[in-house]
Image: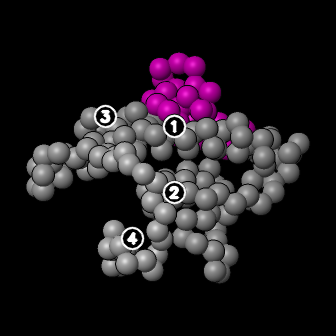
Amino acid sequence: MDESALIERLRRIEALHAGATTDGERLAAAEAKARIQQRLREVSMSDPAIEFRFTLADGWSRKLFVALCRRYEVAPYRYPGQRRTTVMAKVSRRFVEETLWPEFEQLSSVLRKHLEEITDRLISTAVHENVSEADEVVGLPRLSGPGSDDPADEEAPG
């Protein structure tokens, strides 16, 4: 999938979450955004905003989630001492459960797949053609731990 196809797919997912019903609406990203913001305002009247802590597995997911929050005028933040994978936001539970998190999961899935395809292609071209996972070796469970004399227990530097 090329970059323009990825962008179009992400826009269609956003339009779907905004409740778009016609092709014209799907193409109008501004209308989709406005409808979601309106939904957020309506939901916040009956379901007041509370503080949520989101823990995102990697930098790509965090960047996507922060951008999605900002798109809907939800201010993402962190407290001093919190990990970079943590994002805080004050938003209604209903909006998180019905709109924000489901849309993030769909967008994240598409983005993750695209990034994985690019990474595999680059590594197989520049480093080695086999980009599969390391083999799992079946054997007796290991009983030794850190500090043993077994060199296999040593952690890699870094």
- Which residue extends farthest top? 22
Please give the range of residues in magenta.
12-39
Residue on which disc 4 sits = 153
Dot 4, how many residues are within 10 Å of its Cα: few (below 14), some (14-19), or many (20+)? few
Give the foreground label among 2 and 4. Answer: 4
Q: Quadrant of the N terminus?
A: top left
Residue on which disc 3 sits = 5
Mark nearer the N terminus (4 vs 1): 1
Cα–Cα gap, marks 2 and 3? 25 Å
**Which amino acid type is shown beneath numbered disc 3?**
Ala
Residue on which disc 2 sits = 57
Q: Marks 1 and 4: in contact by CB < 8 Å?
A: no
Give the foreground label among 1 and 3. Answer: 1
Q: Position of residue 64 (x, y in %)?
A: 49, 53
Q: Is residue 67 visible?
A: no
**Which amino acid type is shown beneath numbered disc 1?**
Gln
Cα–Cα gap, marks 4 and 1? 39 Å
Q: Is residue 154 left or right of residue 53?
A: left
Cα–Cα gap, marks 2 and 4? 26 Å
Magenta-highlighted stretch: main secondary structure?
A: helix
Residue on which disc 1 sits = 106
Mark nearer the N terminus (2 vs 4): 2
Dot 2, how many residues are within 10 Å of its Cα: few (below 14), some (14-19), or many (20+)? few
Cα–Cα gap, marks 2 and 1? 15 Å
Cα–Cα gap, marks 4 and 3? 45 Å
Mark nearer the N terminus (2 vs 1): 2
Q: For this rendering, which residue is in front, 155 or 19?
A: 155
Q: Marks 3 and 1: in contact by CB < 8 Å?
A: no
At 33% across and 48% down in the image, what residue appears?
137
